[in-house]
Image: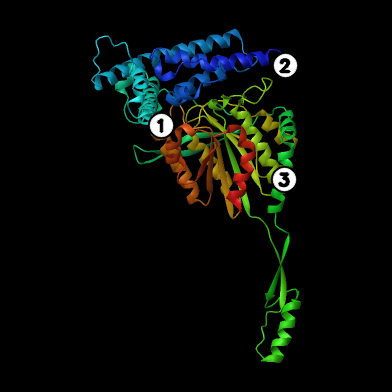
Amino acid sequence: RGLRRDLDLVRERLRAGRPRIAGLPVTLVPFELLFQITLCGGALDDARAFYSQIVSELETIVVEYLADARSSVADTLMATSRVYSLFESVVPDLAEAESRYDEQRGGGDEGGAQSNLERESEEGDEQSEDGQKDAGRRDARELFNAWAAMEASDSAGDDALTGEERWTHGESPEQGLEPDEEAFEYDEWDRDLADTRVGWCRVIEKRTRRGDRSFVELTRTRYRGVISSIRHQFQLMKPESMKRITNELDGDDYDLNALIDFVIDRRADGQQSERIYTKRLRRERDVAVSFLLDQSSSTARTIGRHPLQPYTHPGRRIIEVEKEGLVLMSEALEAVGDPYSIYGFTSEGRRNVKFYVIKDFDELYADEVERRIGGINYQNNTRLGAAIRHAAAKLRRQQARTRLLIVLSDGRPYDHDYGDARYAREDTREALRQARIEGITPFCITIDRDSEVELRDLYGEVGYTIIDDVLSLPERMPAIYRRLTT
């Protein structure tokens, strides 16, 4: 409609013409990232792999100030100010780290015109590309984490801060509660202390803001054939209400075949079986499942249009595809009758982890829930450990033999006061481990193939799957669930 087709074509051509991020001078990297996010429909894969945390910060700024149709000039000015502040802090750190890296490599070149990332790309044919890429990604993440740590405290008073003050100084203030909201406190695992920080995180439970029910209706129309097939398959998983058991010592009725054998055996040798009755036992599935949806700003990424699709089918955001997956799963679970809940989460610091209830166990899948699914949107960061702990606490209250917690995320845990990447992974892994100890089976579905090594480190103990083709997510989720419960 309107200019959408033309804009989609222009965006694709812009994306195709972007330079490799590894070949840019580090002073230009932030500007290239901003260009990709604002004008190209999202950061390219190589940019996100090398500078994932900076991309996340820029996406958060865009979402907070520019994504709303009601954004004003004042919002644009605020976004510009935050971008400038980010660039002023990041660019010097990147340049200084690059210089140190060159010196360590013995690269005291007089001209200094070639950056380490440029040399890295030029030497790719001579050295191991995979090893260089992994090192580059780690360096980029550590650079950003170092910047974030410095930004979190006042430079004038850093030397005076000791102990826990370094953790709490400069963090986001607690947000107030609305009348229908409730706050919970959870511990967080500190890998440096090898112990938990008691009551460190504050989780705010709230209802998802209602959106338009048309999203669910459109999804049902788009996947009409798939939904019909899934519902049929899941109905076959539903056991009969009663099962007839034969060859019992007592029961409701005689087992005719066993009774005939009884008479024959008694006349033959007098050694007959007394198991001549039948029973009817009630059979029920005993499964409860919670879906935990990552609503961080990185889910605003646009998935490229498939080459076989016309330009009337523009790229779609990851969050939209995830929502479609929830619709298909709801249709499937309604068919089989398993109790289920749907939650979403995002975070703005340790004291503002927002936990959205989209559908709770005691709610019917009706208009209200469908409107909440339509209202799901991308927001801020991914403090995964706290969200898992709260979802597990709610799931523990279900009296089911099998309790599943399925986490749907597009990448690694991150929050601006979540420590370095290793700290965040260790806390998330500890939260998943604790859920298992409490009788919950966690399973993670992710689409971030670029960080497979880290994902294996993060989710390896509990099970996970990586979906390469994001657009196939809605159809694959029911198949994954069937595998986990049968």
Q: Residues within 10 Å of mark 3 (few under 14, many from 20)?
A: many
The image shows residue 174 at horizontal and vertical percentages of 50, 27
Q: Is residue 61 visible in the rendered structure shown here?
A: yes
Badge 3 amino acid: Arg
Residue 329, by quadrant, is top right
Judge from the rendering whether residue 436 lies leftward or rightward of residue 139; answer left or right. Answer: right
Q: Nearer the viewer, residue 139 or 368?
A: 139
Number of the label disc, if any, that sits on residue 216: none
Residue denoted by label 1:
421
C-alpha span from label 2 to label 1: 42 Å
The image shows residue 56 at horizontal and vertical percentages of 49, 23
Rendered residue at 48%/28% (across/down): 349
C-alpha span from label 1 to label 3: 41 Å
C-alpha span from label 2 to label 3: 34 Å
Report helix, strand or loop for mark 1: helix
Badge 2 amino acid: Arg
The image shows residue 416 at horizontal and vertical percentages of 45, 26
Q: Residues within 10 Å of mark 1 (few under 14, many from 20)?
A: some
Report helix, strand or loop for mark 3: helix
Pointer 2 with pointer 3, Cβ within 8 A: no
Residue 5, by quadrant, is top right
Number of the label disc, if any, that sits on residue 231: 3
Q: Against 425, is 93 above or below?
A: above
Residue denoted by label 2:
1
Badge 1 amino acid: Ala
Residue 129, by quadrant, is top left
